[in-house]
Image (spheres, grey):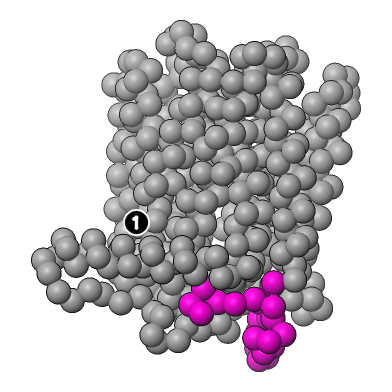
Amino acid sequence: MTQPKLHARTALLVLTALNLLNYADRNVLFAVQPLVQVEFHVSKAQIGYLTSAFLGFYMVAAPFVGPLADRYSRKLIIGLGAIFWSALTLLTAVTHTYAELLIRHTLVGIGEATFVTIAPTFVADLFGEEKRGRILGVFYLAIPVGSAAGYLLGGNLGAHYGWRFPFYIAAAPGFLLAIAVLFLKEPERGQFDSLKEPPEDLPKKVLTGSRLTRLYMTVYLDLKRIYVSVLRNPAFLTATLGMAAMTFSLGGIQVWMPQFLYSERHYSLARANFVFGIIIVVDGVVAALAGGWLGDYLLPRMKSSYYLVSAASMALGVPVMIVALFAKGHAMAPAIAAAAFFLLLNTSPLNAALINSVGPHIRATAIAANIFIIHILGDVPSPTMMGWVADRHSLQAAFVLPVIAMVISSAILFYGMRFAPALRVDGGPAASPELSGASSLAE
């Protein structure tokens, strides 16, 4: 194996492991929510607000991280961010009120934004465009595996040692992986990309004023350009809005499904988290790899393959999700598993569509814009909205909201197929922009 290939695979392994830890950390809370609610005597809406606040700060931090990552060392920002969020996770030991838990959770959101905004751009620069669906499938294996780890850690350790203990286990590996990231070699930006930005649209530094003023103005000008450009890039916009509706659905389901099984279907807390955790990890691993492979397989035949796979998976998930909500017998668990599979099948191709819709030198800023949009429209409001409905009706009624979001996501992504950019496949030239139907964010 050549040195570049060995480095690329090593970097992918380290970043995937850190991504896994990222999702394990945030999903531990979902597994122990009933224990937290009992200790602090709060409503379901307040429990849902913990996740909404976490994602709100995560969302707001991302647009400031993106422009920095388009100029400075990505591995340094990722490493320092991982140390920051791991240290904050350990502070759960001194969390004894709802307000303290809320503050701790919001600060962790800021730390995790440094990773999620930047790591996909790092991974994208390690491999060619024709492999991105499969490579992102490996990277995003961390979502189901990390989520399942969070549910299993929380459900088993929380029941025996208290809800705080699983957070200590989730925090420890973060410090080691952060150090490993600092030893990675940073890849050249856009070395495999078809889509290039013209020089006048690349990120520029402001050269006058104090250092703080220059930094502020540089970030401000980048954010202004990126948000204006988003409205002119239908490939980016449809991928982002489709992802926002998917995130609303997935975010609400992840937060409330264990409690749905616990309170509405009378599972024990440990069994509820075990069943849902196993469903997420098995479905997620298979779906992430299958979705990425299918998108790559269809790409030489149709430039909109990533959009098609994502749209179809959301549409197929709607009927089985309805069965999962209303079936009370043996059909319930298989229906939950099928719904989770279709929801997670779009993870790799939809992220590949997003990454390929913009040029490499503004990609971190574009992903930051994407993060802001998908969370403010997606899983920031969904846990609290579902908690509000559950307090007034039932959790079963609350799950109607994710079903509606799945329908919306599918419709947007089917529409977005017409805007997919043409890419270089198997080393060949990309189709002309006139045939691609999409415009670069740098236009």
User: Which residue occupies the foreground of this view, 97 or 278?
Assistant: 97
Decide: few, some or many residues near mark 1? Use Cα within 10 Å; few <14, some 14-19, many ≥20.
many
Relative to residue 348, is residue 56 depicted above or below?
A: above
Q: Is residue 413 above or below residue 132?
A: above
Quarter assignment of residue 280:
top right
Residue under circle 1? 64
Is residue 397 shown to the viewer in this render? yes
Q: Say above or below: 249 vs 309.
A: above
Measured from the top left, where is residue 77 in percent x and y? 32, 59
Q: Where is residue 3 in the image (x, y as percent from the top left)?
A: 46, 80
315, 289: nearer the viewer: 315
Q: Find residue 200 and report its image quarter.
A: bottom left
**Residue drawn where x is 64% and y is 13% of the image:** 392
- Quarter location, residue 266: top right
Q: Is mark 1 on a helix, strand or loop?
A: helix
Q: Which residue is drawn at 50% across and 21% down?
A: 47
Give the residue at x 37% y 49%: 61
Identify residue type, mark 1. Phe
Q: Give the range drawn in magenta.
A: 419-443
Residue 281 horizontal/vertical position (percent) = 66, 41
Q: Position of residue 329 (x, y in %)?
A: 88, 19
